């Protein structure tokens, strides 16, 4: 009798849907963080040492130091669209493929961007806190007067798939004028489909009533919005960040909000999250949510399943199948 073929070993670094875990077990020997513990770098390194693959969650720094201790590793599959946890150069040098999970979260994340915009402009959480604190004793015509959303100008920085989905909601649902800034201008057909016009970042900041950040994080996009940019915005403007912590200088934003330099902000992501700057926690004109823009069960399941597809594609089918969502495809080409 021939010995059973060894199956690739993979690590799942956080808790995951049971059906996703079950699908992984059909193909791999799986070690899972079912308790959803916060593993130290050392614990992650120890567990990854004998694995060929990892299902990662955008939180684990995959860099030279870690890769040096994990010689068998061939793929890290993020279940997130963002992949700023990957040191792509180091991974490519070590022949480790990185994949992400785009598309499946686009509409859900755009919905949330709009929810945060509405909550911020119309002061939803601030007024709810007021009510819950028992402060609503009489009505006044100026109570929690906010900013208009319909018919206003939305400026989107980062016009990828999610930015475009937000633009469609704004233009066709809310009759907004949509302007955007991006590394490169979109083609005319895509611009028309989103009814959006390209402007410089400077013009966008000066003109928009609401500024929405949807740009991926990189060294180049670090502090896309700092004190100088906030100074360009209208005093009545709102700023929404559903992109990544570090795109906004949170300290500069807290100062601008406290000084009423801009009217309000809605933030789903933070520098150094899950720690949030105490300055932001104490200003009233900011809506804060814990990085939940893609958080619906259906979308999160689809994101995890896409990561599983990427793991199966690479570790089971190897070079026979082009990886679905490679973010450093040269690692695959060279394998
Ligand atoms: C993503 O997919 O990158 C979202 O921010 C969830 O982490």
Image (cartoon, rainbow, N blue to C red):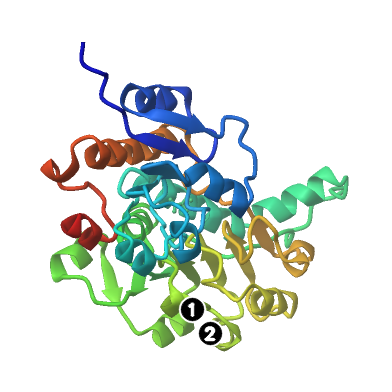
Q: Secondary structure at mark 2?
A: helix
In the rendered image, is residue 330 in sight? yes
The quadrant of the rendering that contains the C terminus is bottom left
Q: Is residue 294 left or right of residue 38?
A: left
List the residue tagged with mark 2.
229
Q: Picture coordinates of residue 28 (x, y %)? A: 35, 29
* 311 with respect to 144 (left or right): left
x, y percent for residue 266: 59, 61
Nearer the observer, 81 or 314: 314
List the residue tagged with mark 1: 224
Within the image, what quadrant is residue 249 found in?
A: bottom right
Badge 1 element:
loop
Classify mark 2: residues with Cα within 10 Å, few (<14), some (14-19) or many (20+).
Answer: some
Q: Is residue 290 visible?
A: no
Spot occupied by residue 235 in the image (x, y as percentages of width and height): 61, 80
Q: In the image, which disc is placed on residue 112? A: none
Q: As displayed, is residue 261 above or below residue 297? A: below
On-image quarter of the N terminus: top left
């Amino acid at each position: 009798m021939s010995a059973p073929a060894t199956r690739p070993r993979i690590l799942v670094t956080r808790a995951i849907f049971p059906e996703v875990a079950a699908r992984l077990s059909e193909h791999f020997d799986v070690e899972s963080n079912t308790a959803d513990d916060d593993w130290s770098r050392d614990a992650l390194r120890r567990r990854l040492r004998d694995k060929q693959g990892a299902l990662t969650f955008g939180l684990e720094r995959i860099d030279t130091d870690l890769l040096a201790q994990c010689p068998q590793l061939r793929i890290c599959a993020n279940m997130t669209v963002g992949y700023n946890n990957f040191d792509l150069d180091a991974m490519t040098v070590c022949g480790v493929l990185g994949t992400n999970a785009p598309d499946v979260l686009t509409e859900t994340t755009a919905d949330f961007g709009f929810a945060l915009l509405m909550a911020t402009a119309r002061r939803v959480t601030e007024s709810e806190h007021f009510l819950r604190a028992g402060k609503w004793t009489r009505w006044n015509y100026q109570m929690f007067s906010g900013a208009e959303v319909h018919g206003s100008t939305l400026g989107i920085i980062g016009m990828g798939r999610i930015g475009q989905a937000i633009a469609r909601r704004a233009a066709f649902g809310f009759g907004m004028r949509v302007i955007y800034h991006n590394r490169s201008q979109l083609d005319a057909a895509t611009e028309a489909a989103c009814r959006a016009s390209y402007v410089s970042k400077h013009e966008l900041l000066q003109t928009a009533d609401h500024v929405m950040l949807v740009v991926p994080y990189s060294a180049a996009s670090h502090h896309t919005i700092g004190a100088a940019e906030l100074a360009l915005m209208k005093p009545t403007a709102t700023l929404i960040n559903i992109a990544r912590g570090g795109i906004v200088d949170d300290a500069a934003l807290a100062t601008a909000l406290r000084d009423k330099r801009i009217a309000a902000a809605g933030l789903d992501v933070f520098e150094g999250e899950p720690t949030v700057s105490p300055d932001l926690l104490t200003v009233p004109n900011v809506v804060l949510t814990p990085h939940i823009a893609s958080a619906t069960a259906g979308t999160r399941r689809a994101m995890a399943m896409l990561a599983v597809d990427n793991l199966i594609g690479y570790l089971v089918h190897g070079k026979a199948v082009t990886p679905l969502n490679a973010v450093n495809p040269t690692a695959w080409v060279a394998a």
